[in-house]
Amino acid sequence: MNVQNAQTWQSVQKEVLRRIHAREWKPGDLIPNEAELAKEFRCARPTVNRALRSLAEGGLLERRRKAGTRVAVQPVAKATLNIAVIRHEVEDRGARYGYQLALREVRVAPTHISAALSVGVQERLLHVMALHLSNDTPYALEDRWINTIHVPTAIEQDFRSISANEWLLQSVPYTRGEIAFAARPATAENAKHLNCPENSALLAVNRLTWDHDQSVTAVQVLFAPGHQMRTHI
């Protein structure tokens, strides 16, 4: 692999995995830090962070604050669920991806959102709604609030050509998150966006992500009827 082309966290992850499997980095070895890897791969440091975090979640790396990152001596198999770029998810299924921005506004959030993000009830946050398509058919409806106090650069994005989902994963690191799954009936508005009958059963994925003690975003993704979620163990 030409490391100069490692521009996504997936490509960085692939190269790190190659080095581990080839024993270029042996169990117990301390690997280069994020800044060094970002310079070598010619990519942003958050891109490296995302790749290493994913491998740590999978049990292949051990990351300790101020002690660096080491190859796990005894890798532990874990069930993992990564935050997916919805575009990649659609394309990995062999379908053509499409994207439509439905709403972008800066306003005071509902109280349950401001409470979840631990911001003042009068703080103005960025609210983005977007429809993701698979072969021109509704795939998922993204309803997202971004904490622009912590992520002020989000205000500069119009999100017409790139989704907030993809931009955040490319641009903003996160250290932890909470995720919940539920079945919910489609409201009239949901049904209009997802082109399904009102009260259809939808899979709702609610996620909250944090960068240490600062909230990043709260999002609900509603998937069209019949959606199947896949992960790996």
Image (cartoon, rainbow, N blue to C red):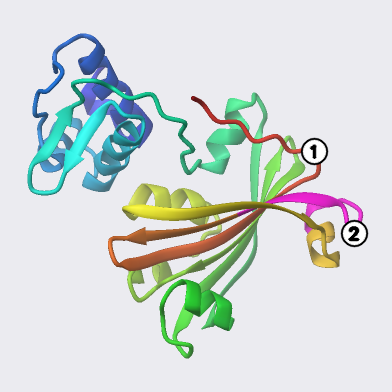
- Callout 1–callout 2 Cβ contact below 8 Å: no
In the rendered image, residue 209, in percent from the top left (x then y), is placed at: 42, 58
In the rendered image, residue 101, in percent from the top left (x then y), is placed at: 63, 59
For the record, the magenta segment spans 193-205
Q: Nearer the viewer, residue 78 or 172?
A: 78
Specify the farthest residue to the bottom: 122
Q: Nearer the viewer, residue 141 or 42?
A: 141
102 over 201 or under it: above or below: below
Q: Residue at the location (80% across, 38% down)?
A: 226
Residue 34: within the magenta? no
Q: Residue at the location (32% across, 42% down)?
A: 50
Residue 204: within the magenta? yes
Q: Which residue is mark 2?
A: 198
Mark 2 or mark 1, which is nearer the start of the sequence?
2
Left or right of 61 on screen, residue 188: right
Q: Secondary structure at mark 1?
A: loop
Q: Residue at the location (34% across, 27% down)?
A: 11
Q: Which residue is mark 1?
A: 226
Residue 157 in view, yes or no: no
Binning the other alpha carbons within 10 Å of mark 1 as few (below 14), some (14 to 19) or many (20 upward) gives: few
Residue 89 in view, yes or no: yes
Q: Could you tell me which quadrant the N terminus lies in?
A: top left
